[in-house]
């Protein structure tokens, strides 16, 4: 019997690992317990011992790919055995591609699991592990059922999931494409005139049979264009972190409206001078950061982090500032924001943003945050509900500052307004302190001169 | 190099002999670890814990990115720093004089956590936390990162490899290294932010022997097995 190599249990909290390096090639003889493949999880690289002796018959998961505990990695054949029919033509992604130096981006997102695949390794693996083998394919039972119901042969589908995995969407797309392809040619020859209406033809003795509605997608049915790109490490890590956050916290949000008029005026007066004297662009972020730190000191639970047994109140204030980049979101951290003045924070944010966009952030730049601020207003959004930056318990969404009509003293007046949204982890933070914290931030932003003096 | 090998006669089978080998070239240490893992896996030697110190060297783990190296290998060589790719997990790490580097060569199943990789990391952190606590430092973990920190500063780095379920590589605790050397891997080592040592945190470095002894004791507690340093230095290192 061929012996399947699977990702073993590697620890209670270990659910997956990245395939590091295959120490054996397909066809290599293997002794029992001999290391055959490296699996990297966090700071550990484990060499998986062979479960049996024989030769390596198949490599099912290529280097650089993340595999879950229990996943099949390959097959060991005993003497004289061959792979079962239809099973595992060895995936042939050249090992050399997977050895390419891993990219720094693997560290781009905080809380990153170790996924160190290079783009080259990813695409090589995706391209080669998708075809024929149904046996080697990783397909969930639900997807398998769906394929069976529709009589779909897995070999006709190109998997778009991790490692060429065929997803439910792939199957649905395939079924849809198949039905369009089957029905389209007969239903409407290409180049048929568009709308021939009964009315235009004048009184007709008998109503013309209803025509099928020409569909825009019909013409493109054969060539519905898709561009397939490998998932970058940055994207994989952002995805993992977002999901981790969603799965591990009780997300809740509260919103408030802030009258930014005083701050708009103050910043307007300061920014030229700051630029001229210090060479730093003064955005609203440093003010908001300062206000947030002040409010965090009054509501320390929002600067805390929790474990199963403890709440850890951090007495330092490292404020993450989400930065958009083409490669994907990243959250560099302004360290010790409570001990920095407005200009230092402005300079920090400017430096971090520039380094983020040039891919020059260090691990240290993105570590150690205690609370995050994210600005969705840069592109005009007036409200959004941010996802917590795990394991932090609060994230403040700031938005477009715009002139809006508001009521003051029974009159409608025009003020510079901004919506603030605080997402918080309701496991640790009750609604009242969350709302009070937000209200405090609002109060500080509405009256900056009352507190900025002692922080300049 | 020849390793002090424990005389197993009369040894408590649960005992983990520990040795402070002092200054050892990195590649020699790597080689002896490989041999020790083999003999441990074959059951020919017990679990052991080696403490060493290295000349300045940058080791690049399996998770390593050349982008985190600021200079070319030649530039590092000119500064007397070797760059060595290694099979442990983790990224680029600096080792140098003033660090206590610990290499536990242990069969995971012989530890209380068994074959649980995360537990193994957490236990190493725990031992180091206890030592730092004994020096009055408020050290902590910073999930999801591995290592031991005081505030934002990393005091101990951890990177482990496992072969045939025997762990090797280990940890590096900054006792009194030249912290400026860490700037050579992180472009933004402004004010040494990000790394600290016992010396920088306490104002003075405690003696190496004392830290080694405390580490051995802490590992005894965490692993629930006696970790014993020899009374005298091994003669043939």
Image: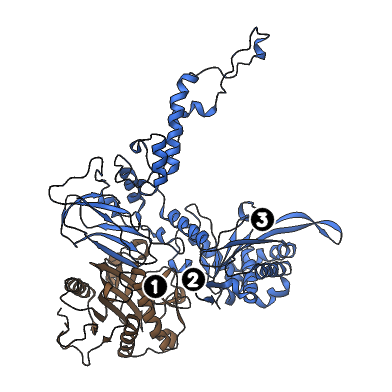
Residue B48 position within the rendered picture, expressed as x and y whole percent measured from the top left: 23, 80
Q: Residue at x 72, y 72 (%)?
A: A449
Q: Colour of chain A?
A: blue
Q: Colour of chain B?
A: brown
Q: Are marks 3 and 1 in contact (CB under 8 Å)?
A: no
Viewer-closest of A383 and B198: A383
- Vertical side of A344 occupied by A226: above or below: above
Viewer-closest of A44 and A118: A44
- Read off the residue under disc 2: A368
Disc 3 crowd rating (10 Å Cα; few below 14, some 14-19, many 20+) is some
The quadrant of the picture occupied by the C terminus of chain A is bottom right
Residue A423 position within the rendered picture, expressed as x and y whole percent measured from the top left: 61, 62
Mark 1: which secondary structure? helix
**Quarter residue B142 falls in:** bottom left
Q: Residue furthest right?
A: A410
- Vertical side of A201 occupied by B69: above or below: below
- Read off the residue under disc 1: B183
Q: Residue furthest bottom?
A: B231
- Disc 1 to disc 2, C-alpha distance: 18 Å
Q: Chain of mark 1?
A: B
Q: Residue at x 55, y 17 (%)?
A: A193
Mark 2: which secondary structure? loop
Residue A400's disc number = 3
Q: Residue at x 33, y 77 (%)?
A: B172
């Amino acid at each position: 019997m061929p012996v399947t190599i699977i990702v073993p249990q590697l620890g209670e909290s270990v659910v997956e690992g990245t395939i590091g390096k295959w120490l054996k090639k397909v066809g290599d003889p293997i002794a029992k317990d001999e290391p055959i493949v490296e699996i990297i999880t966090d700071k550990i690289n484990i060499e998986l011992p062979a479960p049996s002796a024989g030769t390596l018959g198949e490599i099912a998961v290529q280097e650089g790919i993340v595999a879950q505990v229990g996943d099949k990695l390959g097959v060991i054949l005993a003497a004289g055995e061959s792979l079962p029919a239809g099973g595992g033509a060895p995936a042939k992604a050249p090992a050399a591609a997977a050895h390419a130096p891993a990219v720094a981006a693997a560290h781009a997102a905080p809380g990153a699991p170790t996924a160190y695949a290079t783009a080259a390794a990813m695409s090589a693996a995706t391209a080669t592990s998708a075809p024929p083998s149904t046996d080697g394919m990783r397909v969930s039972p639900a997807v398998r059922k769906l394929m069976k119901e529709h009589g779909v042969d897995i070999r006709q589908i190109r998997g778009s999931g991790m490692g060429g995995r065929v997803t439910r969407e792939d199957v649905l797309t395939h079924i849809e494409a198949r039905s369009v392809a089957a029905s389209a040619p007969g239903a409407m020859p290409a180049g048929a005139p568009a709308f021939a209406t009964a009315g235009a033809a004048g009184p007709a003795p008998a109503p013309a049979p209803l025509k099928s509605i020409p569909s825009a997608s019909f013409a493109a049915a054969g060539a519905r264009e898709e561009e397939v790109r490998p998932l970058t490490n940055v994207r994989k890590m952002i995805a993992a972190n977002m999901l981790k956050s969603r799965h591990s916290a009780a997300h809740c949000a509260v919103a408030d409206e802030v009258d930014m008029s005083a701050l708009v005026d103050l910043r307007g007066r300061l920014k030229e001078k700051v630029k001229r004297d210090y060479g730093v662009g003064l955005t609203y972020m440093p003010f908001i950061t300062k206000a947030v730190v002040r409010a965090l000191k009054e509501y320390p639970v929002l600067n805390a982090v929790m474990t199963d047994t403890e709440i850890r109140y951090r007495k330092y204030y490292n404020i993450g500032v989400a930065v958009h980049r083409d490669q994907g979101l990243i959250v560099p951290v302004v360290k010790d924001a409570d001990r920095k003045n407005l200009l230092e924070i402005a300079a920090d944010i400017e430096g971090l943003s520039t380094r983020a966009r040039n891919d020059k952030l260090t691990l240290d730049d993105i570590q150690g945050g205690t609370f995050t601020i994210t600005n969705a207003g840069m592109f005009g959004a007036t409200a959004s509900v941010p996802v917590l930056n795990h394991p932090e318990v609060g994230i403040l969404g700031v938005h477009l500052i715009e002139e809006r009509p508001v009521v003051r003293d029974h009159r409608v007046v025009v003020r510079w307004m901004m919506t603030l949204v605080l997402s918080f982890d309701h496991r640790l933070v009750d609604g009242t302190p969350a709302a009070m914290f937000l209200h405090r931030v609002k109060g500080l932003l509405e009256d900056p001169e009352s507190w900025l003096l002692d922080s300049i | 190099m020849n390793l002090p090998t424990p005389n197993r006669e009369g040894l408590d089978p649960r005992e983990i002999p520990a040795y402070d080998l002092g200054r050892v070239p990195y590649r020699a240490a790597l080689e002896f670890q490989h041999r020790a893992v083999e003999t441990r896996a074959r059951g020919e030697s017990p679990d052991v814990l080696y403490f060493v110190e290295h000349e300045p060297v940058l080791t690049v783990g399996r998770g390593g990115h050349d982008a985190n190296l600021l200079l070319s290998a030649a530039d590092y060589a000119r500064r007397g720093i070797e760059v060595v790719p290694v099979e442990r997990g983790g990224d680029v790490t600096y080792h140098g004089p003033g660090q206590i580097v610990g290499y536990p060569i242990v069969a995971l199943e012989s530890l209380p956590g068994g074959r649980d990789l995360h537990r193994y990391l957490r236990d190493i952190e725990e031992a180091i936390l206890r030592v730092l606590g004994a020096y009055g430092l408020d050290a902590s973990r910073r999930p999801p990162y591995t290592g031991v920190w005081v505030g934002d500063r990393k005091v101990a780095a951890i990177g482990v490899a496992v072969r045939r379920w025997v762990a090797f590589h280990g940890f590096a605790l900054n006792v009194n290294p030249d912290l400026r050397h860490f700037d050579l891997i992180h472009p933004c080592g402004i004010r040494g932010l990000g790394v600290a040592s016992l010396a920088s945190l306490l104002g003075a470095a405690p003696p190496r022997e004392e830290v080694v002894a405390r580490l051995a004791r802490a590992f005894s507690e965490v692993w629930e097995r006696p970790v014993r340093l020899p009374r005298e230095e091994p003669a043939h290192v």
